[in-house]
Image (cartoon, rainbow, N blue to C red):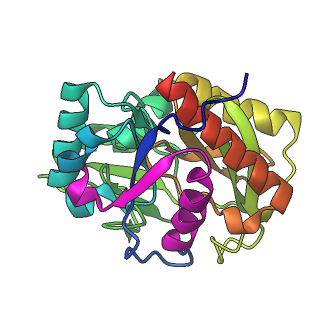
C-alpha cells in the first residue's frame, strides 16, 4: 500500500544536551547523526533535558539520548518522568527499566543473587562479603561517568552513607567489552583492547557464550522498548563479569562500527520508535 504523501508524519521530541562534554566521546556528534537519520521518517525537534517536561505534550513520542548524567539535572529529569507517566507519553527508552535508569542498586541485587557481576555491597555489615583485593572502589548509586568515584585501600563506607554508596573490589581484567541491543535484539559489540584507553574501541565478534552472558542481563531487565548496553570485563581466567547495565541513555560509539552495522542500527532504532507508536 502506498502511503498518503499528505498524511502528517509522527513527531518526535529528541532530548539531548549537545553541549555536554564527556572524556573520550563526542555525544553531540552522535546525536546530530541520529537525528539527521530519524528525520527521514519522523518530524524531529531537539530539546535540552531541562525543557523536556514542558514540551513533551506536543509530540507523539519522546526519545531520550545523550543528555549527560542525570545527576546534573536531577530535578528536571524527575519532573520529566513524572509528567511522562501522568500523561501516558510514549518514551524511548520506556521508563520501566531496572538497570542504570533506576540507579545502581541492581548491582547489589545481582551480586546477592549470584549473577556474574563484579561483587558489590552497599552496607557496612556486608563489607566482609567482598573478596580480598589490592584496592576497592566506592561510588554513588546515582553516579555516572565516574562522578563521585574514589579508590580506597580497604573496603569502607562512611557512617552516613545511608545506602547511597556502593563498594566493589578493583578487578584485574584483560579488557572491557560492550554489547549493544535495541529492545532484545543484539546489534553489535565493541571492546577496548587496552584497559588504560577505555574509549578507544574496536569492533568485537562475540562468541555464543559471550552473547548468552549479555542476553542474560537483557532478559533480566524489565525494559519494554529501547536501547541497552551491557558493559563487561574479561577476567584473567577468561570469564566475563558485568560492569554496568546501561538502559537510560547509553552512548553508542557509532563512529567505531562499520557503515553497514551503523545503518542496520539506525533501521532498528527507527523501527523501535515506530513500534512504540503503534
Q: Give the residue furthest to the front.
A: 6
Q: Residue furthest left?
A: 160
Q: Is residue 261 visible?
A: yes
Residue at left 22%, top 57%? 51
Q: Position of residue 174 (x, y in %)?
A: 75, 62
The magenta segment: 27-52
Judge by depth and name the residue closer to the eye, 83 or 213.
83
Q: Quadrant of residue 258?
A: bottom right
Is 149 situated above or below 216? below
Q: Nearer the viewer, residue 96 or 212?
A: 96
Position of residue 267 in the picture relative to residue 34 (left or right): right
Which residue is located at x 76 percent, y 53 percent?
Answer: 263
Residue at horizontal 64 percent and vertical 44 percent from the top: 241
Residue 46 belongs to magenta span: yes
Look at the picture and state if 3 lies above or below 253: above
Q: Is residue 162 left or right of residue 258?
A: left
**Main structural element of the magenta stretch: helix, strand or loop?**
helix
| Magenta span includes 198 | no
Left-right relation of 223 to 51: right
Q: Is residue 39 above or below residue 210?
A: below
Amino acid at each position: 500500500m502506498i502511503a498518503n504523501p499528505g498524511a502528517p508524519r509522527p513527531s518526535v521530541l529528541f532530548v539531548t544536551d549537545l553541549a555536554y562534554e564527556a572524556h573520550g566521546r563526542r555525544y553531540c556528534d552522535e546525536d546530530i547523526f541520529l537525528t539527521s537519520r530519524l528525520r527521514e521518517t519522523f518530524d524531529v525537534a531537539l530539546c535540552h533535558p531541562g525543557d523536556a517536561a514542558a514540551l513533551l505534550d506536543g509530540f507523539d513520542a519522546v526519545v531520550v539520548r545523550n543528555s549527560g548524567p542525570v545527576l546534573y539535572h536531577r530535578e528536571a529529569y524527575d519532573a520529566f518522568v513524572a509528567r511522562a507517566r501522568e500523561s501516558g507519553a510514549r518514551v524511548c527508552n520506556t521508563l520501566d527499566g531496572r538497570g542504570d535508569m533506576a540507579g545502581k542498586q541492581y548491582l547489589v541485587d545481582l551480586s546477592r543473587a549470584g549473577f556474574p557481576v563484579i561483587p558489590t555491597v552497599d552496607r557496612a555489615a556486608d563489607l566482609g562479603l567482598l573478596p580480598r583485593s589490592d584496592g576497592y572502589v566506592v561510588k554513588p548509586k546515582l553516579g555516572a561517568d565516574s562522578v563521585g568515584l574514589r579508590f580506597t585501600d580497604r573496603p569502607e563506607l562512611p557512617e552516613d552513607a545511608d545506602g547511597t554508596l556502593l563498594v566493589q573490589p578493583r578487578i584485574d581484567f584483560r579488557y572491557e567489552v560492550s554489547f549493544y541491543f535495541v529492545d532484545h535484539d543484539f546489534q553489535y559489540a565493541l571492546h577496548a583492547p587496552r584497559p588504560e584507553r577505555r574509549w578507544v574501541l574496536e569492533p568485537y565478534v562475540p562468541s555464543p557464550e559471550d552473547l548468552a552472558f549479555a542476553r542474560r542481563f537483557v532478559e533480566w531487565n524489565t525494559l519494554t522498548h529501547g536501547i541497552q548496553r551491557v558493559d563487561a570485563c574479561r577476567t584473567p581466567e577468561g570469564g566475563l563479569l558485568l560492569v554496568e547495565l546501561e538502559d537510560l541513555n547509553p552512548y553508542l560509539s557509532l563512529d567505531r562500527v562499520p557503515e553497514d552495522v551503523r545503518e542496520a542500527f539506525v533501521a532498528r532504532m527507527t523501527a523501535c520508535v515506530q513500534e512504540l507508536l503503534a
